[in-house]
Amino acid sequence: MRPESLNSAIEATKLGLPAVTGIAEVSIQEVKRIGRKLTPFDKQFIGGVVCSLMEANGYQKTGTKKAISHKAFSKGEFYVAVPTAV
C-alpha cells in the first residue's frame, strides 16, 4: 500500500464506491509481479489492509457491501467519513 493507493481508495469512497475499487488493479498487478495468482485469501488480506487504512484515516465501515466493477473482485465494503468535532 502506497500513499497514492490510499488516496485512490478515498477517492473511490467519495464517488460512492467501495474503497477497494480504487486499488483493485494495482493489487492484482502486485500479486502478478511476485509470480502468483490472486487467491481468496489474498482478497481477504487486501480487504483487511484497506479496512485498517481507511479506519486509521477517519473512515468507518457502513456494514454495506457493494458490487465493484473489477473482474477479480465481486464486492467490497463501503466506508463513510467520520464527522470530526469542531
Image: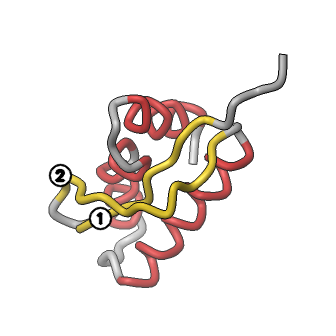
> Do the residues bearing badges 1 and 2 touch, measured as CB atoms within 8 Å?
no
Which quarter of the image is occupied by the C terminus? Answer: top right
Q: Amino acid at mark 2?
A: Ser
Q: Amino acid at mark 1?
A: Lys
Give the left or right position of residue 14, taking residue 73 as reference. right
**Residue placed at 37% from the left, 63% from the top?**
65
Helix, strand or loop at mark 2:
strand
- In x, y percent, where is residue 12? 38, 36
Which corner quadrant of the image does residue 48 belong to? bottom right
- The image's mark for residue 32 is none
Helix, strand or loop at mark 1:
strand
Of residues 47 and 15, which is closer to you in this image?
15
**Residue placed at 51% from the left, 47% from the top?**
79
- In x, y percent, where is residue 60? 62, 49
- In x, y percent, where is residue 39? 35, 82
Which corner quadrant of the image does residue 30 belong to? bottom left
> Of all residues shown, which one is farthest toward the top?
86
Residue at numbered disc 1: 75
Across the whole image, how many numbered discs are drawn on residues?
Answer: 2
* Mark 1 or mark 2, earlier in chain: 2
Mark yes or no: residue 33 visible: no
Which corner quadrant of the image does residue 32 belong to? bottom left
Q: Residues within 10 Å of mark 2 (few under 14, many from 20)?
A: few
**Residue placed at 42% from the left, 68% from the top?**
34
Residue at numbered disc 2: 69
Could you tell me how far apart the alpha carbons at marks 1 and 2 are, in whole angstroms? 9 Å
**Residue placed at 42% from the left, 30% from the top?**
14
